[in-house]
Image (tube, rainbow, N blue to C red):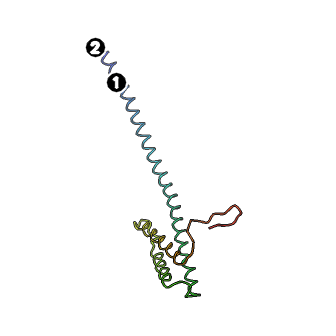
Amino acid sequence: MPGPQKRSSLRQDDIFDAVVDLETSLFQQGFDDGFISGVRLGKDEGREVGLKSGFELGEEIGFYRGCVTIWKIALERDSTLFSARAQRSIDHFDEQLRAYPLTSPEDERLQDLLASLRVRFKAIMAMLSIRLDYSGYPKASSAGEISF
């Protein structure tokens, strides 16, 4: 009778091996499905965050560009409006803005260049004795007015 017991024991081992194999294959299938889903969602979320960040960056650079345009128009009308030092700072700020690589988002210098623009903008504001801070897109107040 040793033969039938041996067969029974083999069948039991095969059953447990199949259960272990099923668990492993289901785990791997779940991992693969989750990975594919994560890649797809990651790309979508990355695109959304990139668009938002790009818009905010463009908005800030546009704000600075608008300030430079207004200062230059004011100087065309009255060249003595700002000191020579302030005029040089505005010209240098204008050059920095024009050199800012908006179309090269992979440029590693972007954050450093933006920080430099912010510092120069604050310095110009101090030279001109103007209190103006860029704080993002203007929000509507409760009275329906736009505040900056």
**Front-most of residues 7 and 126:** 126
Q: In which image quadrant can residue 30 be found?
A: top left
Q: CA distance from mark 1 to mark 2?
A: 17 Å
The numbered mark, 1 or 2, whose residue comes first in the sequence reads 2
Marking on residue 31: none
Label disc, if present, on residue 2 of the rendered structure: 2
- Which residue appears at 51% of the width and 78% of the height? 127
In the picture shown, does residue 49 fall above or below 116?
Answer: above
Q: Is residue 13 above or below residue 127?
A: above
Q: Is residue 83 left or right of residue 19?
A: right
140 or 128: nearer the viewer? 128
Percent x, y for residue 144?
70, 64
Relative vertical location of residue 29 with respect to residue 114 in this rendering, above or below: above
Q: Give 143 or 80, whichever is nearer the viewer.
A: 80
Q: Amino acid at mark 1?
A: Asp
Identify the secondary structure beneath mark 2. Answer: helix
Q: Which residue is mark 1?
A: 13
Check the picture and name the quadrant holding the C terminus: bottom right
Instruction: Assess disc 2: are there few (<14), some (14-19) or many (≥20) residues with their C-alpha within 10 Å of its C-alpha.
Output: few
Most extreme residue toward the left, as rendered?
Answer: 2
Q: Amino acid at mark 2?
A: Pro
